[in-house]
Image (cartoon, rainbow, N blue to C red):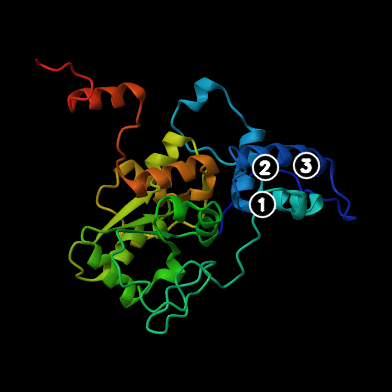
Amino acid sequence: MTSQLHHSPGATRPDGRPSPGARLLGPAIARAAARAAAPGGLRFTERQLYYATCRVLSPGSALLRRLPRTPAPPLRLTAFTRALDARGRHTVEGLLPPVPPGTGGVYPVHDGDGKGDGDGHGTSEPDVYAYGLPRLLVCQDPSIARMLLANHVHLEAACPVLTAVDALPLAPRLTAALERAGGATVHVLHDASPSGLALPARIRAALGPVPGVRVSSMGLVPRHVAALRLPSGRGPVPGPVLGTGLPPGLLPAEARWLARGRFAEVAAVPPARLVRTVLRVTRGSRPPRASLRSDLRGLRDTGFLTWPSA
C-alpha cells in the first residue's frame, strides 16, 4: 500500500552529500536495529526497522503510551530510506534482504508434481501433504511472511507460513490436508486496511465448502492499532465500496477511521511482540508450565507421596 508517512527533511543535499538530518538518523537507526533484534538476535525487515526508528525518535512518556491513539509517524519514509542507503544496508545486523519485486517472497505449494512444499526449499517427496494439516498461517505482507520464516516461527508453531500471493488460489492438496486434520484453522495476518480486513473473507471464499476448516483473522484491526499506539499512514479515501468484504464485527468508529484513508501495517508491531503473538495464537492454549510444586502435587494425588494405610 502506498503511504504518506510524515515528517522529516530530506536525507541528502542537492549535491548528493548526506544532510545533517541524515547523519543524525544514523545513530537512531543503530539503536532501532538493536531493539528490533532483541531478544536473541531476531531477523527483521526494512519496514520493521523503519517503524523501530520511529519509536526511537518519539519514545513518549509512560502515561501517553497508555492512551489509545494512532499517531502519524515522526519520520518520512523516504528520509529513512536515504539515511539507510547512506549508512549501508549490509552494516545493519539482522536486516533481511528485500522481497524481489513481483513475487510473494515464499514459494507456493505446488500441486501434483511434488516440486514445491510451500517453504521455499522444494521437495521430491510425493506424500508431504498426505497427512492432516491442523493450522496454516497466511500473511498479507510477503516481507512479514519471510521474517517469520527467518525466525523459525513455522517450526516452533508447527505451522506452514504462506503469503496471500502464494496461497491464493489454494492448492487442492493443501485444502485436502486441512480437511483431513479435522478442525483445522487458517490464520490470516493482515494490515489494518480495507484490503487487509477483506483478506479473510477472500480466503474463506477460496476454500469453498470445506467441512471443519475455520478461517480466523489474527489482525490487525483499527482497535488493535489504537491500543498498541501504532503509527498509521494515510492513503486515498476508499470510496463507497469500503464495506465490501469487511468483517461484520467492525465498530462504527473503526469504519470511520478506515473511511478517512487511514491504515496501519503489521510491520509497525515490534518484531518480538509480533513473533510472540503469532506463536501464542497459532499454537493455541498451552498446558500449565511444570513446576516442582505441581509435580509433587501430581505425585501425591497418584499415591507416590502418601503413607501406607496400614
* Residue 299, horizontal then vertical, whole percent: 24, 26
Residue that mark 3 sits on: 26
User: From this viewpoint, is residue 65 visible?
Assistant: yes
Q: Secondary structure beneath disc 3?
A: helix
Can you say whether 305 is above or below 283 in the image?
above
* Image-based side of 57 in relation to 219, left or right: right
Q: Secondary structure beneath disc 2?
A: helix
Q: Which mark is residue 33?
A: 2
Amino acid type at mark 2: Ala
- Along the polypeptide, which appears first: circle 2 or circle 3? 3
The CA distance from mark 2 to mark 3 is 11 Å
Residue in front for this viewpoint, 174 or 73: 174
* Image-based side of 163 in relation to 78, left or right: left
Residue located at (54% from left, 51% from top): 151
Amino acid type at mark 1: Leu
- Along the polypeptide, which appears first: circle 2 or circle 1? 2
* Residue 76, horizontal then vertical, whole percent: 66, 47
For the C terminus, the image quarter is: top left
Could you say which quadrant of the image residue 67 lies in? top left
Residue in front for this viewpoint, 45 or 294: 294
Residue located at (46% from left, 34% from top): 69
Q: Secondary structure beneath disc 1?
A: loop
* Residue 98, horizontal then vertical, whole percent: 64, 61
